[in-house]
Amino acid sequence: MLSIAAKAGKVQSGGFLTEKAIQEGVAYFVIIAEDASGNTQKKFMDKCKYYEIPYTIAFDSTTLGRQIGKQERTVLAVTDAGLAKQISDKLD
């Protein structure tokens, strides 16, 4: 499902772009890699809580990157509400 979202251009990945998507209100779901540093995990969990965006901690950074056809990624945001709900439901 993440690969479909990425091919549709509905994923922002990497720290800078994910943070920007959260702050601009276009992120509907955030995935943080299990092996992201404690500081990175805390930063994005805090931002998601503040902006009331659902998030999960799942996958390692290599797997997360591969899911969207990129190299390692520690964090990404899904920017389509429908796809975000489907991905969130599958990960629960």
Image (tube, rainbow, N blue to C red):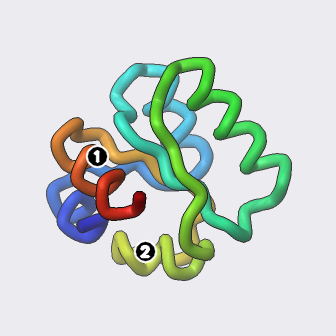
Q: Vertical placement of 31 versus 79: above or below?
A: below
How many residues crowd around disc 1 within 10 Å: few (fewer than 14), some, or many (20 or more)? many
Which quadrant would residue 50 be assigned to in this image?
A: top right
Marks 2,1: beta carbons within 8 A: no
Q: Which residue is mark 2?
A: 70
The C terminus lies in quadrant: bottom left
Q: Nearer the viewer, residue 83 or 66?
A: 83
- Tell me the kind of residue under disc 1: Ala
Q: Position of residue 25 (x, y in %)?
A: 39, 21
Q: Position of residue 3 (x, y in %)?
A: 26, 70
Q: Vertical placement of 58 versus 8: above or below?
A: below
In this view, which residue lies farthest toward the front? 92
Q: Residue at image x 81%, y 59%? A: 37
Q: Residue at image x 84%, y 54%? A: 38
How many residues crowd around disc 2 within 10 Å: few (fewer than 14), some, or many (20 or more)? few
33 horizontally vs 84: left or right:
right
